[in-house]
Image (cartoon, rainbow, N blue to C red):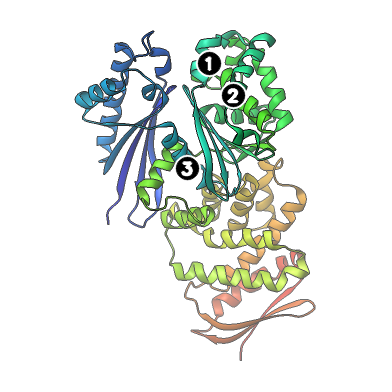
């Protein structure tokens, strides 16, 4: 099977986006290209409710450009979907026909239910969450979904969005308390129509879309957050409310100076956040979770698996995907290191006061420790850290991703401290201590298969008072290399783990 590429065009009310996904020969997937045009189609609807000729021509020209870009990538399958702006237009059928005639691409117009469903699939495959509300704020509509046990219970598409409300309330110069109250009242009237929203209080609110991502970036800039990723970023209620009130009173020119806020969203961010914070308060939600995946990801997962697009384990899917993308060492060696690392952990956990959460981090780190070798072997540790730290391992928090990156890349205590120094806001001294221990355990496991031949076939681990004895019962060859490298770890093991390593033979 050759690499396959899929081009997905998402025609929204605020922007038109292209994402090119690739499914590799090894079965991995990745995003290889993307593009965006801020079209504001919601603002190009005339008094008769139709998309204007100027708006239609802009749409056609954008799709033509994206078509050229997709042809450059030799796309296997092209998909164009449209949401609220086209769905709610009085001349939807004419738009679809005109675009197909001009570009050869037929637009699928998603219903509100289809939009909510695909957004949910993209989200649930990227976060470790069982129950909650999902809100997707677009330019012309907002989808709210209640999910329990990772399945949709109820959903509805509301005819309010950041572009349409901005047009109605003219929020460029900020909102007065009276305007804000009126806007919030309109949102609450919409929410009041559905009892299932009010009756499922105290759940987290997962947030999709450009408004949510912009909110996360602004908040991160305000607190000097050291990790540049918005996916799986959490904001607490009081912080969010305080930031929104502060922003709602700013003039457009003042908002333009805000770190984290892009120029194409400066004018529509206030109504977008009004929807978000009003819904949060109405639902009595516990906290905000920003999700970087959404509609386009849901469409791609549907393409990968038409029967059941929802992944049973997003974390393991992401780990397996990274391994398939960075496949430089035999899987047998990775399996051996993984097995040895977990067995060493189980032998040492009580002595070192380690818990099941630490085992989980070590399990993933021991599978990914050599992925940096796809860039260059001699500095693979540094490359491994960079790849893991800047990859979106779905289901893991920012702190967990950084911890796994540091464990996988471990060489010495000093290098560990230097790597994690920029992230001191996320990694405490006590966590640094445990990462040091786990990194050293992984290094022992790597050393025991240093020739990458799985020479150590049968063995027993025996922890006495101050010595960890590795009793070799059967081996493919003499473990001279492994013994030599174990000897070089003795000093670090004594300082960090309080033990001596001993390799014995029958």
Residue 101 picture quarter: top left
Could you tell me which secondary element the residue under label 1 belongs to?
A: helix
Where's residue 110, x and y in %?
A: 38, 32
Q: Nearest the camera: 280 or 76?
A: 280
Labels 2 and 3: the sequence-earlier one? 3
Tell me the residue that label 2 is attached to. Answer: 275
Quadrant where the C terminus is found in the figure: bottom right
> In percent of the image, x 55 and y 55: which residue is there?
381
Q: Is residue 229 visible?
A: no
Where's residue 305, x and y in %?
A: 37, 52
Q: Nearest the camera: 297 or 390?
A: 297
42 lies left or right of 278: left
Quadrant where the N terminus is found in the figure: bottom left
Above or below, 37 relative to 339:
above
Could you tell me which secondary element the residue under label 3 belongs to?
A: helix
Q: What is the C-alpha distance between the residues marked 2 and 3?
A: 21 Å
CB under 8 Å between callouts 2 and 1? yes
Tell me the residue that label 1 is attached to. Answer: 165
Labels 3 and 1: the sequence-earlier one? 3
Above or below, 59 relative to 251:
below
Q: Which mark is residue 122?
A: 3
Q: Nearest the camera: 165 or 216?
A: 165
Other residues around mark 1 within 10 Å, as few (<14) / some (14–19) / many (≥20): many
Q: Is residue 223 visible?
A: yes
Where's residue 366, x and y in %?
A: 57, 62
Where's residue 462, x and y in %?
A: 70, 81
Other residues around mark 3 within 10 Å, as few (<14) / some (14–19) / many (≥20): many
């Amino acid at each position: 099977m050759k690499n396959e590429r899929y081009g997905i065009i998402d025609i929204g009310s605020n922007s038109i986006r292209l994402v090119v996904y690739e499914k590799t020969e090894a079965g991995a997937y990745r995003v290889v290209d993307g593009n965006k045009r801020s079209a504001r189609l919601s603002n190009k609807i005339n008094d008769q409710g139709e998309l204007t000729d100027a708006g239609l021509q802009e749409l056609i020209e954008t799709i033509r450009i994206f078509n050229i870009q997709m042809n450059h990538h030799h796309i296997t399958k092209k998909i164009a979907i449209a949401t609220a702006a086209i769905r709610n237009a009085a001349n939807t059928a004419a738009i679809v026909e005109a675009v197909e005639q001009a570009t050869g691409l037929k637009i699928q117009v998603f219903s509100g239910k289809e939009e909510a469903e695909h957004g949910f699939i993209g989200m649930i495959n990227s976060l470790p969450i069982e129950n909650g509300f999902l809100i997707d704020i677009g330019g012309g509509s907002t989808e709210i979904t209640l999910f329990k046990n990772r399945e949709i219970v109820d959903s509805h598409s509301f005819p309010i969005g950041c572009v349409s409300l901005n047009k109605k309330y003219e929020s460029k110069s900020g909102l007065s308390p009276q305007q804000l109250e009126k806007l919030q009242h309109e949102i609450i009237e919409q929410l009041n129509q559905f009892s299932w929203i009010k009756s499922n209080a105290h759940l987290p609110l997962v947030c999709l879309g450009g408004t949510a991502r912009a909110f996360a970036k602004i908040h991160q800039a305000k607190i000097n957050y050291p990790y540049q990723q918005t996916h799986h970023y959490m904001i607490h209620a009081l912080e969010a409310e305080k930031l929104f009130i502060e922003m709602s009173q700013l003039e457009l020119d003042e908002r333009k100076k805000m770190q984290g806020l892009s120029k194409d969203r400066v004018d529509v961010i206030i109504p977008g956040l009004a929807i978000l914070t009003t819904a949060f308060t109405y639902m009595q939600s516990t906290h905000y979770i920003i999700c970087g995946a959404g509609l386009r990801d849901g469409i791609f997962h549907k393409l990968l698996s038409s029967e059941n697009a929802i992944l049973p384990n997003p974390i393991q899917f992401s780990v397996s995907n990274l391994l398939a993308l960075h496949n430089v060492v035999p899987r047998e060696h990775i399996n051996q290191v993984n097995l040895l690392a977990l067995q060493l952990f189980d032998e040492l956990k009580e002595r070192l006061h380690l818990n099941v959460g630490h085992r989980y981090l070590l399990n993933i780190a021991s599978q990914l420790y050599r992925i940096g070798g796809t860039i260059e072997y001699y500095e693979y540790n540094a490359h491994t850290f960079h790849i893991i730290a800047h990859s979106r391992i779905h289901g893991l928090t920012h702190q967990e991703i950084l911890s796994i990156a540091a464990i996988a890349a471990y060489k010495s205590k000093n290098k560990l401290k230097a790597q994690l120094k920029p992230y001191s806001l996320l990694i405490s001294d006590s966590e640094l201590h445990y990462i040091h221990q786990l990194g050293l355990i992984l290094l022992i496991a790597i050393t025991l298969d240093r020739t990458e031949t799985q020479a150590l076939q049968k063995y027993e681990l025996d922890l006495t008072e101050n010595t960890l004895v590795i009793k070799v019962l059967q081996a493919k060859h003499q473990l001279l290399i492994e013994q030599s490298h174990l000897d070089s770890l003795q000093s670090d093991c004594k300082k960090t783990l309080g033990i001596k390593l001993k390799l014995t033979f029958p």
